[in-house]
Image (tube, grey):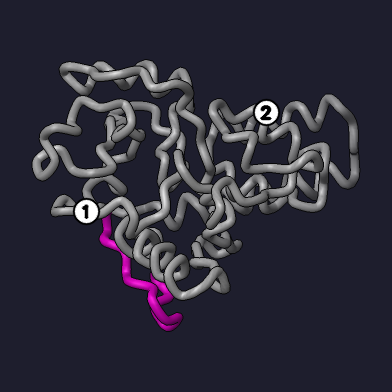
Amino acid sequence: MRPVNKGKDAGEFKPYQDAQNLLQERIGEFCSYCERWIASAIHVEHKQPKNEYPKLQYSWQNFLLSCSNCNSTKSHGKLNLDDYVWPDVHNTFLAFQYAAEGKIHPVTGFGPSLDARIDKTWKTLGLNRHPDTATNGFEAPTTKDKRWTHRRDEWEKAHRRQIELKKYDTPHLRGCIVDMAASRGMFSIWFTVFSDDIDMRRRLIEAFIGTDKTSFDDEFQPVKRTATL
């Protein structure tokens, strides 16, 4: 999950939908959770649901952007922020591992507390939905939930571009690949596929609007953003 930086606190927005344009300017037209580019019907997402936390429904600090799948899957009951990891707070790229078949795996080994928060985020957002339910923790997606197929297809596109780059490595092709990635979304997939290429890592971080640069070191490798993640 791409770590994002929303910039300075923009205060309150009444109605909260008015925050959409500024959010898109600062972090791009991507779902903050599944990372897909959303051409239309992107939602101003409340990290803590507005019905249960009415005092936070206008607060910039409580906003992200979400697609309809992630928005409907996420819990709408009482929600403790400290039970989850968040792309505007943590380096969530370190929390999840992306695979060619469209799966997202939660990363473990941080310790029982943080591992549990990552796992809960994975399940609450439905990032564990995939037809191959034989692996522990995965659930079957609904017929309307195409997120896993979009991840699989995007991985294939990124992999094909990687093969092309190995054959015809030019600055122009590198720029074209990054432009393609930034127009489609799914930063974490492109970054994972090109993880061995320092120049492509740099280009991808710079091309995706609002990617948190403090979540990467001088060689553009992911590092902890906070004391825990």
Badge number at residue 79:
1
Question: Which residue range is magenta in the image?
Answer: 129-144
Q: Residues within 10 Å of mark 2 (few under 14, many from 20)?
A: some
State the image coordinates of residue 95 (x, y, percent, origin top left): 53, 59
Residue drawn at (53%, 42%) of the image: 3
Q: Main secondary structure of the magenta part?
A: loop
| Sequence-wise first label, 2 or 1 | 1
Badge number at residue 206:
2
User: Which element carries disc 1, helix, strand or loop?
Assistant: loop
Badge number at residue 147:
none
User: Which element carries disc 2, helix, strand or loop?
Assistant: helix
State the image coordinates of residue 181 (x, y, percent, origin top left): 62, 35
- The answer to which of 201 and 221 lies nearer the viewer is 221
Q: Considering the image in quadrants, where does the C terminus appear?
A: bottom right
State the image coordinates of residue 213 (x, y, percent, origin top left): 64, 34
Q: Is residue 176 magenta?
A: no
- The answer to which of 50 and 132 lies nearer the viewer is 50
Q: Reply above or below: 94 against 3.
A: below
Which amino acid type is shown beneath numbered disc 1?
Leu
Q: Is residue 133 magenta?
A: yes
- Is residue 215 visible in this depiction of the protein? yes
Q: Residues within 10 Å of mark 1 (few under 14, many from 20)?
A: some
Residue drawn at (53%, 60%) of the image: 96
Q: What's the CA distance linking mark 2 and mark 1? A: 33 Å
Q: Reply above or below: 115 against 38.
A: below
- The answer to which of 171 and 92 lies nearer the viewer is 92
